Image (tube, helix red, strand yellow):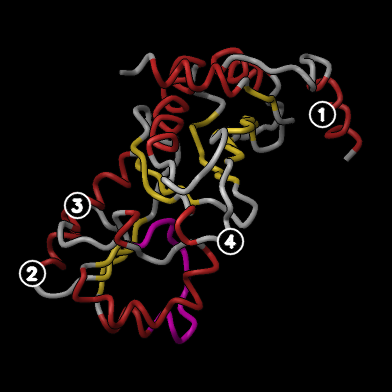
Amino acid sequence: MAKKTKNTTAAKRQYDKSALYGPHDALGLVRSMAFAKFDESVDAVFALGIDARKADQLVRGTVSLPHGTGKEVRVIAFVGGEKLAEAEEAGADIVGGKELAEGISAGGPLDFDVAIAAPDMMPHVGKLGSILGPRGLMPNPKSGTVTPDVGKAIKEFKAGRVEYRNDRYGNVHVPVGKVSFDAEQLTANFAAVADEIIRARPAAAKGRFVRKVSVSSTMGPGVQIDPSQVEDLVKSLH
């Protein structure tokens, strides 16, 4: 533990905790401060000007990262009939229908990152709400995980499509890659995420939408990003 504390202290000396950085510089700092022996994930947190208690101000969706997430994504597909073969060919790790849902309901393993369901499977999958919901794994049409085109959805999530949703405090946490990515790759992924979140602004949200932004690696300290520079980055995409 002493070594971890020493590494963390050394990392924090590399930047000004109270300063606001541009996205590219912030992500570069996150890479330079990563000290773990494994390839740490890099995550972005957006503090949004929404009232998370109101249904018309929730922010949720999916976004494709240009350079992927850097991790293997395990996908479970709830399908039946001819879509069983479609899901398998698309690369789903676990495929099944009613029996698969019943197995999970009975305490089966939850060793997957994304759950995708064909619409006709939702009467069975819907019963797993209390199991999958708290873990953020429940298929939902808004996130593109309930769809008749299961093959396309599976391929997209395997290739680096990620789901985002606000928490009870109005924050959105999204992975943007790994510290092994270069700063340009991380910035491109971050820009795609920021663009999508800003597009998802609820009509009922008032005032400044993106209030705070920070990025960090799994074991590293958070680096704050200037929200106005995030907006400029997104504008440069269009």
Q: Is mark 1 on a helix, strand or loop?
A: helix
Q: Distance between the residues labelled 2 and 3?
A: 13 Å
Q: Which mark is residue 53?
A: 4
Residue 114 sits inside the magenta stretch: yes
Which residue is denoted by mark 3 in the rendering?
A: 90
Total numbered badges shown on the rendered structure: 4
On the rendered structure, is 22 left or right of 85? Answer: right
Q: Position of residue 38 (x, y in %)?
A: 62, 35
Of residues 126 and 50, which is closer to you in this image?
Answer: 50
Instruction: Characterize the local packing of mark 1: few (<14), some (14-19) or many (20 or more) Cα atoms within 10 angstroms.
Output: some
Instruction: Report crowding for label 3: few under 14, some 14 to 19, many 20 or more residues within 10 A (C-alpha).
Output: some
Q: What residue type is labelled 4?
A: Arg
Q: What residue type is labelled 3?
A: Ala
Q: Which mark is residue 82?
A: 2
Prevailing secondary structure of the magenta residues: loop
Instruction: Classify mark 4: helix, strand or loop.
Output: loop
Cα distance, mark 4 to mark 1? Answer: 36 Å
Alpha-carbon span between mark 2 and mark 4: 41 Å
Discs 2/4, front: 4
Magenta range is: 103-115
The residue to which callout 1 is attached is 8
Marks 3 and 4, how far apart at CA = 37 Å
Q: Which amino acid type corresponds to the residue marked 1 in the rendered image?
A: Thr
